[in-house]
Image (cartoon, helix red, strand yellow):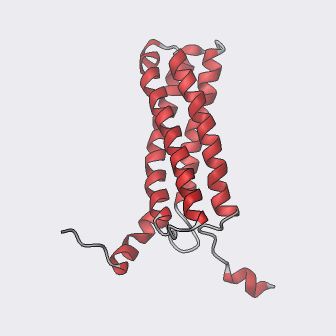
Amino acid sequence: MQRSLTKEELSMASPLLHGPPGHPIHPPLTDVAIGAYTVATAFFVLGALGIAEDAMGKAAWLGLLGGLAGSLLSAVTGIADLLRIDRDSPTFRAGTIHGAVMATGTVLFALAAIFQYDGFHDGRVTGAGLVFCLAGFAALSIGGFLGGGLVFRHGVRVEPDSRSRDAS
């Protein structure tokens, strides 16, 4: 029988998974993945248009790998934040939907990387890689919008700043 972690044990891992108070770690990690996927998508499109296709095919694949690495770290911290939310709340449901959409995007980007692998070696943009990358970018955009709603609509990880209260 496996025992559950105590609150004290969870709080020791907290700075690694959640960031220190007032500085959540999940949002900057999402920026890594979003940036890499955006660059990969741009390289795919430019290569498909015939602009330096050899370089773009290689760069697109490398961008996807960077995005997948960022997604892994982002997912771990996002799940850790989600598990702190009351499971019966609309916020938890919104977080679950956000996570599912982002997971779908990650799978689409992983498929793009698999199909672009030959293009990396041949110096070309593959059709399947381009299609999966564009589909992944659409999911990423929707998931990012939903993630923004978690912060701005539901107030997830928004903590009052005592200095701004004292200054007014």
Residue 67 visible in this rendered orientation of the protein: no
Residue at the farthest bottom position: 166
Number of marks in the rendered image: 0
Q: Taking 25 as reference, is 117 above or below it? A: above
* Front in this rendered view, residue 65 or 76: 76
Which image quadrant: the C terminus? Answer: bottom right
Percent coordinates x, y for residue 100 in the rendering: 51, 47
Residue at the farthest right position: 168
Percent coordinates x, y for residue 39 in the rendering: 60, 33
> Which residue: 21% across, 68% down?
2
* 99 relative to 43 in the view: left or right: left
Q: Quadrant of residue 157?
A: bottom right
> Which residue: 52% across, 61% down?
25
> Which residue: 48% across, 66% down?
18
Residue 82 visible in this rendered orientation of the protein: yes
Q: Taking 156 as reference, is 130 above or below it? A: above
Q: Quadrant of residue 14?
A: bottom left
Q: Quadrant of residue 48?
A: top right
Percent coordinates x, y for residue 107 in the rendering: 46, 36
